[in-house]
Image (cartoon, coloured by chain):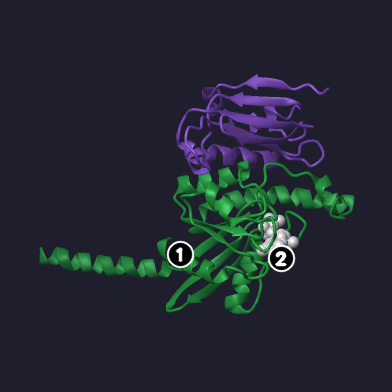
Amino acid sequence: MVFKRIKNIIKKSFISKLFKKKKKIKVGFYGPPNAGKSTLANRISQDFTDEGFTVASSIPHETREVMIKESVIIKKGDKEVEIDLVDTPGIATKIDYEDFLKHGLKKQEAKARAKEATKGVIDAIKWLENVDAVVMVVDAAQDPLTQVNVTILGNLESRGIPFIIAANKIDLKKASAHKIREVFPNYEVIGISAKTGKGMDYFYEKLIELVSKG
Amino acid sequence: MAELSIEYLPYEDFKKMKPKKVINMIRKKNRILIIPKKLNPKEEAMLIEEAMNAADIEKFKGIEIASIVKEEEKGFWKFLRKFKQDDGITLIGNADAIKEIKSRKNYAILKVK
Ligand SMILES: Nc1nc2c(ncn2[C@@H]2O[C@H](COP(=O)(O)OP(=O)(O)OP(=O)(O)O)[C@@H](O)[C@H]2O)c(=O)[nH]1
Ligand SMILES: [Mg+2]
């Protein structure tokens, strides 16, 4: 009896140690192309490490491979968490190289970008297996009722990955975090502008909450 | 006017098929597959993955996919929740022929190229 209890105590402390090691949580930034995943991930990295780690651009599919910034300590008040930022390529069901031509890319560049982008989407989906929590980034100036959003959110739910929704670009006139909230009333939706920094204080509070859950 | 052909794919058959084979079925332009069931998120993700795998930039750009489910209650969240249910249908089309499928309550809007 006593022996068993001692064994249990040893087991528990062992498990808690394991747990502590695992405490560094991988937070994936997911969403459709151009939503602002990289801008947001970079802002977080800038705010807490003074350096960026990924590239943002107005041309869709800028991120074509998973980019990781390890061991970022997020501090807010008396709370802090250590996370790996995982910036993923935007998920799409189709990629048309001709769209890139409109952004001024040459045909060859556009085709190469398209090919890489298809690999990026696969990469992003595969990485769902590796992330512990997710910040789902959507453009609050756009219709959130898209198949890509449904598929990502559905996968997060069915895989039991905790997540929050960042309704990004609220600096834009036609953006509405409220509309995103209306569409997803049971999820945590936080209005932010990754570009101007609006709403980031509250976002960090919620991010710490999310990670503490994961 | 462009023609669209609609092909019926029973869910039991879909489930037995490799994603690659499903994608091959819509590589023919102007074809839409109808599966009489709402796919689950993993199946959706698998199809997207395979579509990206098969995309060859010139001839095949990818797919458009959407589900139609019965919607009694307000809120998209409920709609999303429907992934746990069997009812509904799934439309999958070649992105070359179908510009967009918008899924709405009880119906879908297809934008055809
Ligand atoms: N107005 C506004 N623009 C933003 C905001 N966040 C990002 N952007 C712009 O949106 C475009 C896309 O931003 P990215 O951060 O590259 O988007 P992404 O989601 O990483 O895109 P992919 O890597 O292509 O999937 C860029 O031109 C950004 O400057 C924002 O809060 N407000
Ligand atoms: Mg990016």
Q: In which quarter of the image is the C terminus of chain A?
A: bottom left
Q: Mark 1 points at which residue?
A: A211
Is the residue marked by circle 1 packed among few (<14), some (14-19), or many (20+) residues within 10 Å? many
Taking the spot 39% from the left edge, 70% from the top edge, the residue there is: A20
Disc 1 residue type (three-letter): Val
Q: Mark 1 — on which chain does it sit?
A: A
The residue to which callout 2 is attached is A55
- Relative image position of residue B59 (x, y in whole percent): 80, 36
Percent from the top left, x then y, of residue B75? 51, 42
What residue appears at the point 51 percent right and 32 percent down from the top-left corner? Answer: B71
Q: Is residue B27 visible from the viewing direction of this image?
A: yes
Shade representing chain B: purple
Tell me which amino acid carries mark 2.
Val
Quadrant the N terminus of chain A occupies: bottom left
Q: Residue at coordinates 43% horizontally, 68% vertically from top-left?
A: A23
Position of A57 with respect to A44 (left or right) is right
Question: Which secondary structure, mark 1?
Answer: helix
> Is A122 rendered above or below residue A2?
above
Using residue B72 as the reference point, say whether residue B51 is left or right of it: right
In the image, the residue with mark 1 has its CB under 8 Å from the nearest atom of ligand 1: no
For label 2, being within 8 Å of ligand 2 is answered yes
Whichever of labels 1 and 2 marks the residue nearer the N terminus, that label is 2
Protein chain holding label 2: A
| View quadrant of ligand 1 | bottom right
